[in-house]
Image: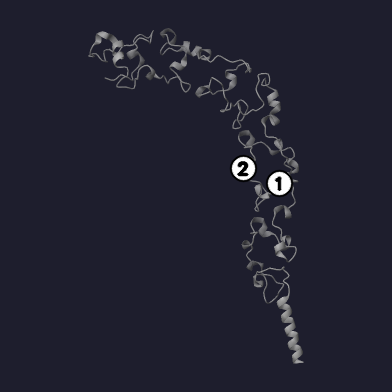
Amino acid sequence: MNKFILLLISFFLTASVFAKSPHGEGFKIDCGACHNTINWEQLNPRHFNHNKTRFPLIGQHKTVGCRACHPTLEFSKAKTQCNQCHMDMHEGTVGKDCDRCHTPKSWIVSNVKQIHQQAGFTLAGTHAVTDCNRCHKSASQLRFDNIRTDCYSCHKANYDATNHRADGFGTDCFPCHNMTGRDWSYSGKGFVHGTFPLTGAHNINCILCHKTGEYKTVLSSACKTCHLDKYNATTSPVHRTAGFSQDCQTCHTTTTWTSFNHSSYFPITSGNHNVSCATCHTNTANYAIFTCVTASCHRNAHNQSRGSAGCYQCHPAGKS
């Protein structure tokens, strides 16, 4: 009898040693990580650190029941790809990499601008606040079918409403308009304006120069074409009677009217020469005439017989 009991115990011990784990072959996690000796079916999942596996539990995955991902006891067969557990609501139009737009924390997409930039279409200006459905017509069904990104595909009506086609303009809006503006009248800084660069105060609305809205005709680039009224109205000094050139850029820049570059004639920054115009140009009718010798300037200058022209001939930089 004792021999039979020993044989029976030996059989069960041998069977338990060679029994297959319900979790599959190669399962190396210690049983105590989940089970206890009091009740084999009473699990202690808190003792098991899921973050040490190939699928850390982050965000909403922490609240999911184990059986939702592990329908069988062979844990190695659990699916790890998003589309293996989650139905593709976009019907294959955005690929299978859910991580590009979503995170385990929420389905809400928070990196819309980054996604568009990676796709080659930066959301800037008006495009950044435009409703998705205006471009992605199928977005209401959660489909994001591939769409064209050329300007004309969306802005055909705007293009056709102008004289652009008759004036020879192409359908690429970007050379003249940019996306940072809030309306079409905002000129693009990248626009190549030919032989008349739009710098400083000239970087204005096109219609201010092209008053008829027709752009094929080449306008005159002469300053007086636009600024003759200002030229005639100037009194300090009087440009018209003083014989000033009507080529404004001789004295002025596109930055400001008051930035007369006197150094191209005589550096008034030398010595005490930074005085009022009338100090040297006593004949306001002709600013080509100047004097170096006045009651307060160079009264004791040598060789005065040669006059102011002689002074300038020897001292063109205003230095001794």
Q: From the top left corner, tell me how far across and down residue 137 is, in percent.
A: 74, 37
Residue 34's quadrant in the figure? bottom right
Q: Distance between the residues labelled 2 and 1?
A: 17 Å
* Residue occupying image coordinates x 75% and y 85%: 8
Numbered disc 2: secondary structure = helix
Res. 84 image quadrant: bottom right
- Residue 121, relative to residue 288: is it above or below? below
Q: Name the residue under label 1.
A: 95
| Image location of residue 120, percent across then percent down | 63, 38
Which amino acid is tagged 2? Gln
Which quarter of the image is occupied by the N terminus?
bottom right
Q: Residue 295 carries which label?
A: none
Q: Which residue is drawn at 74% across and 79% down?
A: 15
Please state if 11 lies on the left or on the right of 274 as rendered: right
Mark 2 crowd level (few <14, some 14–19, many ≥20, 10 Å Cα): some
Residue at coordinates 70% horizontally, 31% vertically from top-left? 154
Amino acid beneath label 1 = Gly
Q: What element carries label 1?
A: loop
Q: Quadrant of residue 244?
A: top left
- x%, y% of residue 253? 46, 20
Instruction: Give the quadrant of the C terminus.
Output: top left
Query: Which residue is drawn at the image coordinates 73% and 88% (left, top)?
Result: 6
Q: Is residue 73 above or below residue 257?
A: below
- Percent across and percent down for residue 129 are 64, 37
Give the camera-side residue of 272 and 79: 79
* Residue 15 as seen in the image, left or right of residue 301: right
The residue identified by callout 2 is: 114
Q: Are marks 2 and 1 in contact (CB under 8 Å)?
A: no
Q: Residue furthest bottom?
A: 1
Q: In this view, does 133 lie above or below 33?
A: above
